[in-house]
Amino acid sequence: MSARTGLGYDSHRLAAGRPLILGGVELESERGLDGHSDADALTHAVIDAVLGAAGLGDIGMHFPDSDDRWRDADSIDLLRSAVAAARGAGYAVVNVDATVVMEAPRLGPARERMRARLAEALGVDPGAVNVKARTGEGIGFVGRGEGVAALAIATLDG
């Protein structure tokens, strides 16, 4: 048995006319994240963490934005595929810890739903998934309210 750790990061611009989806949960917001899929930066960071821990590359290798199959894709479905790939390589998710960096809206009211959606896709108990929120403190693209960033770390066992 060997534990492996992977780190994931993603960021997307905020844009009018798009839903704001994070951790598979739609949040009430006037702007959403712009991207090829549903642009769920939190789930994308988790996908990269899982793939990285399993030594399977990154989200762009598995779900390239140059492929129309992934246009408007539900990132939770992409996460399920990444977890299946990790399982195929002999690894199981143990836990995930993630941080979302954004100015608004507050994630607190949706945090437990995010944990539950991510946990279901990861095949773990919600207690094995942690989602934290931070602001950009007025610094950089996040601090100016131009976008959202997310970081995740995943531990896999195999």
Image: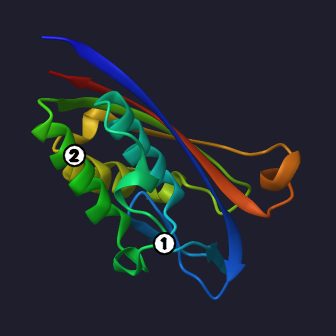
Most distant residue in the top direction: 1
Which image quadrant is residue 46 in? top left
Q: Residue at x 29, y 57 (%)?
A: 117
Residue at coordinates 27% horizontally, 34% vertically from top-left? 127
Q: Observer-nearest residue: 102 or 46?
A: 46
Disc 1 designates what residue? 66
Residue 20 is situated, as x and y percent measured from the top left of the image, at 55, 72
Residue 63 placed where, x, y %? 38, 62
Secondary structure state at the residue bearing disc 2: helix
Disc 2 residue crowd, few under 14, some 14–19, many 20+, Cα 10 Å: many
Q: In the image, which is nearer the foreground, mark 1 or mark 2?
A: 1
Q: Nearer the viewer, residue 36 or 109?
A: 36
Residue topped by disc 2:
83
Residue 76, image x and y in percent? Answer: 31, 62
Contact (CB < 8 A) between labels 1 and 2?
A: no
Q: Quadrant of the C terminus?
A: top left
**Percent coordinates x, y for residue 89 in the rendering:** 15, 34
> What amino acid is found at the position of numbered circle 2 in the picture?
Val
What is the quadrant of the N terminus in the image? top left
Q: Nearer the viewer, residue 103 or 57?
A: 57
